[in-house]
Image (spheres, rainbow, N blue to C red):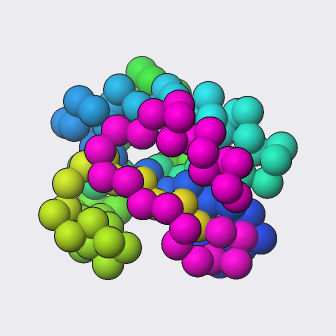
Amino acid sequence: MASFRGQNLLVNFWATWCPPCVAELPLLSAFHNENKPKNWQVLGLAVDQPSAVKRFQAQNPLSFPVALAGMDGTEISRSLGNLSGGLPFTVVFSPAGAVVHRKIGRVSPDDLAAWVQAG
């Protein structure tokens, strides 16, 4: 995470078996493309099996990096405020590394616009 210091960072916990997760990925990919020049980075953390994520990405390329969190991803998301462990879960960090927004459930274009405006 230290490599993202100095940027606004949106971290999205998702899985290939989670329909709302899969549905929001194109929106997050477009958000990344549009806002990367404005000091925003998106990171996907897949709470899933490596083979499933690899297959998914081969068929649905994303514009942002995806890391494999495996089942440990649930515990990582809980440590960031996702007490239920539900997916999708999104956390926004300030350039200094502080958590500034959290959302359980699918993000909307309005959420993303508000976070950019605030950040």
Question: Residue most toward the left?
Answer: 84
Where, quadrant-wise, is the N terminus in this rendering? bottom right
- Quadrant assignment, res 82: bottom left
Q: Which residues are magenta?
A: 94-119
Please determine whether, in this image, residue 94 is positioned above or below residue 50.
below
Residue 85 horizontal side relative to residue 89, left or right: left
- Quadrant assignment, res 108: top left
x and y percentages locating residue 78 in the rendered image? 26, 72
Res. 61 in view: yes
Residue depicted at x 70% and y 33%: 33
Residue depicted at x 79% and y 54%: 39
Residue 83 belongs to the span the image colors magenta: no
x and y percentages locating residue 51 in the rendered image? 29, 42
Please determine whether, in this image, residue 25 is positioned above or below residue 91.
above
x and y percentages locating residue 57 in the rendered image? 44, 32
Please determine whether, in this image, residue 43 is positioned above or below residue 93.
above
Residue 39 horizontal side relative to residue 73, left or right: right
x and y percentages locating residue 47 in the rendered image? 28, 54
Numbered disc total: 0
Instruction: Out of 108 and 8, give the one closest to the viewer.
Output: 108
